[in-house]
Image: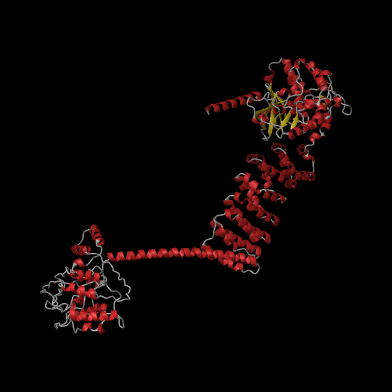
């Protein structure tokens, strides 16, 4: 990388040194800045050509410099001869003015080191283009090295040279004397210009007489720069020391041959023996045939042969050459017309520009850009011609690269963007808007192109507005979003609302519908849809345009309309429009189809939302129930009834109760202790709370039990065998009789084990009580001891079966006692006073009914026996057998003849379920241990 930079630095330094040494001190540098060495030209390619600019106007020029170091090898008088010859040629060129001659911008200036003058911008000499790179910089420009002449350039270039010679011969009465590729210059536009008048000869006769041109004899001793190029010189110069206008035509033929032969002349001349070479050349020319001119195109081959004829009179003159068919090429004629454009009137120009788009595709791009484009843009100063010129300029812009467009075309279009008259200019720009937005830089689009579109939307012409609205969707994707949102859309809306033309209003709606996809969803919902409700007219076309915008927004994946918008704004607007009298059947059907589609989506979306909301509410409700249950476990019982129940159950036994979570209390105690010192009363209170919390913590939590009803059994089972087995097992059990406590408040009560099951009055909130009877669990001293009379026969048999201590409470779901064979003995009981239940009243609260132990025992026994009695009216053997079995069991097994409990009328309906014998045995085992 460093070596590359060093090489570039050395090259730039060398070029700068060459320029400085070549032009240093020359008066040309006072007015012009000299740039890069680009080409060489003139006799012997002695002139170096630099590009430059005029300091005052920044106008581009070409600076021709002759460095006197080239002639240091010559003697002083030879140097003077060379300098005089060069000066003479430049001075003559400066005096002549013609489009086919190189235009001098600044006359010749001489300094101690060089000669210099300035001309119009130059590309290169024809010799450089044909491959002669003498006196060029070491690093030849790729533009010259790779330059290839197109056929149209060659044809029109030769035509231009012919026209220049015609001017010299006819108007100036002058023979150029040295028409060579070195003296033909290609300017910046590609035009061929003549220079090098060092050896020109003017007519010595008056203008009205036949011109006569004196000729000097060839002097081989003169320096080569003081002699014309013999390879392009006519034979009569050397052999007969004469010259005429035909001599220049011979040189033109030799140039034409060299152009078609890659720069090689038809004859090579030995400058050391010029006469012998020309004598041999003369013989060859006299025998010259078409076979020797194979490199020349066939349509001009005959004319080139005539130009190279030995006899000057046979050669065509310059005016005749301009009219040969070879130069009738459409490209050459087009370029020729451009060169004479300033001579035409507006009508002729307009006709020519109308047909130009058909010709431009046939021309090379370089020719169009270099030759045609400058001529077209020069017509922009004429407003009447702009509508005819502008389509051609934009057609050329399509073939240019973006860089070429920005450099060559955009600067010329800037003033045209601002022109409002004639109106066709705006139409042309709108039709090519995609091109402008594609190749124009963003800043220029914002400053020049889009303001023109805005003017078109606000134009008074309806046709302009319609065209603009039709074209905007084609380039909407190229417009930046802020400009579209803040400038373009408001103007379209204004055009729709303020116009009196139905076509403009409809086109505005269509335009909005087509550019919706380039807009933001919320901008459409907040700005475009409300605008639709402001449109005053109700014509069918307008209504369908409104419907189209709604439908496009509704169905577009990017946009869409929310259900709130549908329900609140869109449907209330569309439904009244759908019943307008102006709509036909198809239009009405379109409205209804869109409305139905909107309603369907509204229904589905809102239904989905409600379903999701319902699910969330159910989930939240379940969470709330769980939180309430947990909170109820953690919360202390504050009401009076709960305190009484807690006190009663604490008296019965701490193991029968469960307390709430006391951790929160302990945390509260710790927090209180942390806040500061406590009074004695507070400390006592805290100690009591800690004791209470410790008791509650040791208790089991209360859990609700759900009673699930069991489906009734339709068929009655025969339980005789099961009852007999169970009763036999019961009679074999030996239950110890507890001792009567001295502190008992209850006297001996003639009751059975069933009569002690206080299931009904127990508070249902205490769910932790033992489900069943546990023989091993006895009441504490603070509880109630309920002894059984030891002399009483429990089941009416001889064996003694009693219950020592039974739990007071039982949960609502008691064990199924269907396995018991019969009710307890109730025949002969000792008459005793009613049991005092006041203590239990305090336990269960005032709302509980007062029931005596005998009544409770009878009620439970009745319910239990009802399980084994079939329904009334049951028929069949099963019912009779069941009754017989019950009678047998009542008389023999239980010894309860005459017992009122066994009256069939007292039997209740059967329960919903019948417990199996195995489950009954298990329940009895759990009961009696």
Q: Position of residue 631 (x, y in %)?
A: 30, 65
- Nearest the viewer among 664 and 799 is 799
Report if residue 908 is visible in the image. Answer: no
Question: Where, by quadrant of the figure, is residue 881 drawn?
Answer: bottom left
- Nearest the viewer among 770 and 157 is 770
Q: Residue furthest right?
A: 209
Q: Position of residue 417 (x, y in %)?
A: 67, 47
- Residue 218 horizontal side relative to residue 894, left or right: right
Q: Position of residue 80 (x, y in %)?
A: 73, 18
- Residue 130 horizontal side relative to residue 850, left or right: right
Q: Is residue 380 above or below residue 900?
A: above
Q: Residue furthest front?
A: 877
Q: Residue at x 21, y 84 (%)?
A: 900
Question: Where, by quadrant of the figure, is residue 534 drawn?
Answer: bottom right
Q: Is residue 184 above or below residue 841?
A: above
Q: Is residue 878 above or below residue 534?
A: below
Q: Position of residue 869 (x, y in %)?
A: 27, 79
Report if residue 575 is visible in the image. Answer: yes
Q: How many badges with numbers are in the image? A: 0
- Residue 431 horizontal side relative to residue 901, left or right: right
Question: Where, by quadrant of the figure, is residue 463 drawn?
Answer: bottom right
Q: Quadrant of the C terminus?
A: bottom left
Which colour style is shown? secondary structure
């Amino acid at each position: 990388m460093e070596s590359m930079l060093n090489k570039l630095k050395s090259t730039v330094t060398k070029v700068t040194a060459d320029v400085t040494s070549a032009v240093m001190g020359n008066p040309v540098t006072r007015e012009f800045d000299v740039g890069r060495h680009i080409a060489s030209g003139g006799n012997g390619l002695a002139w170096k050509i630099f590009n430059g600019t005029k300091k005052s106007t920044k106008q581009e020029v070409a600076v021709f410099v002759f460095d006197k170091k080239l002639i240091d090898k010559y003697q002083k008088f030879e140097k003077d001869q060379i300098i005089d010859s060069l000066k003479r040629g430049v001075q003559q060129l400066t005096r002549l003015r013609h489009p086919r001659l190189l235009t001098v911008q600044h006359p010749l200036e001489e300094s101690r080191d060089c000669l210099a003058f300035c001309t119009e911008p130059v590309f290169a000499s024809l010799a450089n283009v044909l491959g002669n790179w003498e006196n060029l910089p070491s690093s030849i420009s790729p533009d010259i090295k790779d330059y290839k002449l197109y056929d149209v350039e060659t044809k029109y270039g030769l035509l231009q040279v012919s026209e220049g010679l015609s001017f010299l011969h006819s108007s100036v009465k002058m023979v150029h004397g040295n028409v060579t590729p070195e003296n033909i210059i290609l300017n910046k536009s590609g035009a061929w210009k003549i220079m090098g008048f060092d050896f020109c000869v003017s007519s010595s006769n008056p203008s009205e007489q036949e011109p006569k041109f004196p000729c000097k004899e060839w002097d081989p001793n003169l320096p080569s720069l003081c002699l014309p190029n013999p390879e392009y010189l006519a034979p009569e110069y050397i052999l007969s020391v004469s010259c005429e206008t035909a001599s220049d035509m011979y040189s033109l033929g030799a140039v034409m041959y060299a152009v078609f032969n890659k720069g090689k002349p038809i004859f090579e001349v030995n400058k050391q023996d010029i006469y012998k070479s020309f004598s041999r050349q003369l013989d060859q020319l006299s025998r010259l045939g078409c076979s020797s001119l194979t490199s020349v195109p066939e349509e001009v081959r005959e004319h080139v042969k005539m130009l190279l004829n030995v006899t000057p009179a046979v050669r065509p003159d310059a005016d005749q050459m301009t009219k040969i068919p070879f130069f009738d090429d459409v490209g050459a004629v087009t370029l020729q017309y451009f060169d004479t454009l300033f001579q035409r009137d507006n009508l002729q120009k307009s006709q020519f520009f109308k047909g130009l788009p058909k010709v431009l595709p046939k021309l090379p791009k370089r020719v169009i850009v270099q030759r045609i484009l400058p001529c077209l843009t020069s017509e922009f100063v004429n407003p009447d011609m702009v509508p005819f010129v502008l389509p051609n300029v934009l057609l050329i812009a399509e073939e240019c690269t973006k860089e070429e467009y920005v450099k060559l075309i955009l600067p010329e279009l800037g003033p045209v963007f601002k022109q409002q008259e004639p109106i066709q200019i705006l139409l042309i720009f709108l039709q090519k808007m995609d091109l402008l937005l594609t190749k124009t830089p963003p800043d220029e689009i914002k400053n020049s192109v889009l303001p023109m579109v805005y003017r078109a939307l606000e134009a008074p012409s309806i046709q302009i507005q319609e065209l603009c609205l039709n074209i905007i969707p084609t380039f909407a994707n190229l417009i930046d979003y802020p400009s579209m949102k803040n400038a373009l859309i408001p103007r379209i809306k204004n055009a729709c609302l303020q116009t009196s033309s139905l076509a403009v209003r409809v086109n505005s709606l269509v335009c909005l519908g087509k550019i919706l996809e380039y807009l933001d969803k919320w901008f459409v919902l907040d700005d475009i849809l409300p605008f639709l409700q402001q449109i005053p007219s109700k014509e069918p076309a307008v209504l369908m345009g409104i419907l189209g915008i709604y439908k496009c927004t509704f169905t577009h994946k990017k946009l869409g309309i929310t259900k709130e918008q549908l329900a609140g704004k869109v449907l209330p607007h569309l439904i009244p429009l759908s019943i307008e009298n102006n709509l036909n059947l198809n239009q009405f059907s379109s409205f209804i189809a869109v409305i139905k589609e909107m309603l369907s989506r509204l229904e589905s979306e809102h239904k989905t939302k409600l379903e999701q909301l319902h699910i969330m509410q159910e989930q939240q409700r379940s969470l709330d129930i769980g939180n309430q249950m947990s909170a109820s476990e953690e919360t202390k019982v504050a009401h009076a009834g709960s305190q009484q129940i807690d006190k009663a159950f604490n008296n019965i036994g701490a193991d029968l109760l469960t307390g709430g979570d006391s951790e929160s209390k302990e945390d509260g105690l710790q927090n209180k202790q942390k806040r500061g010192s406590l009074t004695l009363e507070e400390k006592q209170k805290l100690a009591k709370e800690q004791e209470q919390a410790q008791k509650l913590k040791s208790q089991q939590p209360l859990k609700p039990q759900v009673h699930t009803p069991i489906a009734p059994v339709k068929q009655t089972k025969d339980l005789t065998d099961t009852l007999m087995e169970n009763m036999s097992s019961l009679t074999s059990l030996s239950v110890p009789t507890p001792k009567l406590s001295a502190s008992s408040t209850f006297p001996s009560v003639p009751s059975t084990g069933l009569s002690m099951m206080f299931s009904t009055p127990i508070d249902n909130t205490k769910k932790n009580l033992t489900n069943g009877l546990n023989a091993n669990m006895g009441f504490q001293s603070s509880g109630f001891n309920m002894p059984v009379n030891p002399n009483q026969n429990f089941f009416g048999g001889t064996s003694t079966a009693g219950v020592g201590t039974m739990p007071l409470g039982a949960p609502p779901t008691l064990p199924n006692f269907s396995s018991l064979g019969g009710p307890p003995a109730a025949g002969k009981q000792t008459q005793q006073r009613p049991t005092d239940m006041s203590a239990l009243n305090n336990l269960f609260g005032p709302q509980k009914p007062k029931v005596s132990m005998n009544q409770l025992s009878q009620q439970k026994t009745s319910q239990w026996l009802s399980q084994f009695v079939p329904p009334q009216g049951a028929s069949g053997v099963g019912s009779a057998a069941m009754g017989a079995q019950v009678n047998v069991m009542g008389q023999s097994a239980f010894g309860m003849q005459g017992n009122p409990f066994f009256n069939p009328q007292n039997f209740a309906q059967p329960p919903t379920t019948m417990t199996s014998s195995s489950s009954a045995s298990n329940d009895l085992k759990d009961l009696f241990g």
